Structures are given as C-alpha cells and as structure tokens.
C-alpha cells in the first residue's frame, strides 16, 4: 500500500505525471484500456517516453466490433500484449437467465448490477497483482470527474497508485495529439461517439450535447459511472 504520493508541479505534463506515478508505485503498473482516443494516446506517450507499462482490457461480452478493431490496431502498431479479462461465466448466465438481456435499462440498481458483473469484478482481478494503474480520465469529461487529481491513492483497490496523466487535457488537445502522431483511433469516435462503452449502453451524441451524454443516456448525469472509479 502506498502511503505518500510525490509532489508534482502545478502544471505537470502528462509524461511527468505518468513517470512520477510509475516510480511511486514501485512495482507493476498497467493501463486500463477501453481503446478510447485518450487511452491510446497514453500508450503512445509511454512508448515515446520509454516508460514501461502494461495494458489490460475488460471484455464485457458486449463491446462494439469497432472497439475490437481498435484493439488489434494498437496491438500491431505498438507490438504489445494486451491482457484481456472477462466476467465470470456463471454470473453472466444467471443474470441473463433471470433478468433477460436488457435489465440494465429498467433501474439504476439493475444497471449497477450488470456493470458490477461485467466490469467491476473483472477489474478487481486485473488490479490484484498491480502496484498501480493508469486511466484516461479527464476532468472535463463529466460532473463526476471534476475533482480528480493527477495521482491518487486508490483505497478501494488496496491502496495502489492511480495515475491520471491526461487529467487536465481538453478534448481538443487529445485530438491534436492523436492527429499529430497518427495513432490508431476507434472508428466510432468519427461517428459521434466521444465516449465508448458497451454497445447497448452507448449512443452517438447530438450537436451541443455533453460528451458523456451518449453513455447510459436514460440516466441523470450524476449517475453516469459504472463503478470502476470508486472514490
């Protein structure tokens, strides 16, 4: 368990945050990758800076084909092995047998149950051997993320280091980097999906909508998290 985090300059760069977090962890660190433009940007940054990180992904069983295509493009471009984690088969079978395929749209509790089975439990297994993990979270993404800090002690996950290198980046800055570096990009981003999750829980946003409006669009903004980022 990490007891103290290093101090960072007020305007620390993504590379500085990433490097400081990896060094503070003092053990294996991996990126939780959903193959968003943010996550792939972090992979590219780490490769360019020579920072050694792993990459893991959660296959919920309901991802878009475009997400799998992006995963393969990343694997080939950077020559990295992606550690895939899946939900427990028995839990998924029980959920779908008892509540059907779309129970998550019936209530917030049901949606949290589905996310817990398909995402949270696999994440816990992925984090268990790690000293730190990296996310592509940015403050401007959501009302639930405005108080994020670059480095955190992740108490709900055993006190490991949580590293948010793009915390202060704007969407425009992320895309400027992606285009300059010509990194692989999930095709759904070009089709109006700034935020991409499971296929049944994600839609394209309309002009003027918040970037997270397409996630669980039937819910209030303050509920739009899946439990992966407990505070």
Image (cartoon, rainbow, N blue to C red):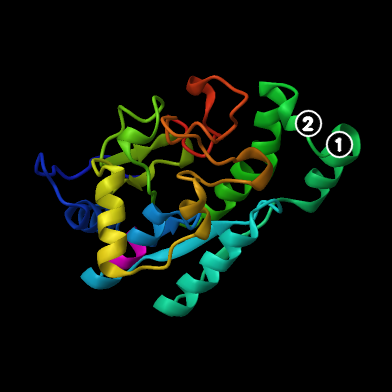
The residue nearer to you, when weighing 25 against 18, is 18
Outermost residue to the front: 207
Residue placed at 11% from the left, 43% from the top?
11
Q: Position of residue 52 (x, y in %)?
A: 32, 69
Q: Secondary structure at mark 1?
A: loop
Horizontal side of residue 95 vs 210, given as left or right: right
Residue placed at 54% from the left, 19% from the top?
220
Question: Is 184 situated above or below 139?
Answer: below
Magenta region includes residue 43: yes
Q: Position of residue 28 (x, y in %)?
A: 39, 62
Mark 1 burial class by Cα count in 10 Å: few <14, some 14-19, many 20+? few
| Quarter occupied by residue 39 | bottom left
Residue ID for mark 2:
103
Residue ID for mark 1:
100
Residue 27 seen in the figure: no
Magenta region includes residue 74: no
Residue 134 seen in the figure: yes
Q: Are marks 2 and 1 in contact (CB under 8 Å)?
A: yes
| Structural distance between the alpha carbons of marks 2 and 1 | 6 Å
| Quarter occupied by residue 153 | top left
Question: Which region shows up in magenta?
Answer: 42-46
Residue placed at 50% from the left, 31% from the top?
213
């Amino acid at each position: 368990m990490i007891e103290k985090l290093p101090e960072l300059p007020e305007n620390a760069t993504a590379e500085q945050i990433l490097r400081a977090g990896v060094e503070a962890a003092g053990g294996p660190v991996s990126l939780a990758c959903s193959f968003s433009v943010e996550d792939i940007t972090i992979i590219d940054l780490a490769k360019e800076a020579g920072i050694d990180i792993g990459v893991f992904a959660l296959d919920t069983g309901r991802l878009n084909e475009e997400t799998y295509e992006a995963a393969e493009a990343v694997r080939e471009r950077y020559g990295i092995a992606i550690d895939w984690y899946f939900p427990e088969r028995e839990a998924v079978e029980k959920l779908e047998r008892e509540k059907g395929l779309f129970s998550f749209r019936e209530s917030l509790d049901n949606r949290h149950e589905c996310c817990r089975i398909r995402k949270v439990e696999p994440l816990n297994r992925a984090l268990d051997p790690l000293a730190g993990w990296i996310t592509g979270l940015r403050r401007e993404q959501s009302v639930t993320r405005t108080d994020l800090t670059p480095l955190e002690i992740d108490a709900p996950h055993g006190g490991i280091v949580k590293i948010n290198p793009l915390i202060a980046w704007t969407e425009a800055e992320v895309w400027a980097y992606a285009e300059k570096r010509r990194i692989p990009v999930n095709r759904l981003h070009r089709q109006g999906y700034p935020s991409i999750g499971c296929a049944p829980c994600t839609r394209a946003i309309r002009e003027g909508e918040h970037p997270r409006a397409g996630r669980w669009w039937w819910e209030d903004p303050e509920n739009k998290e899946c439990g992966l980022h407990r505070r």
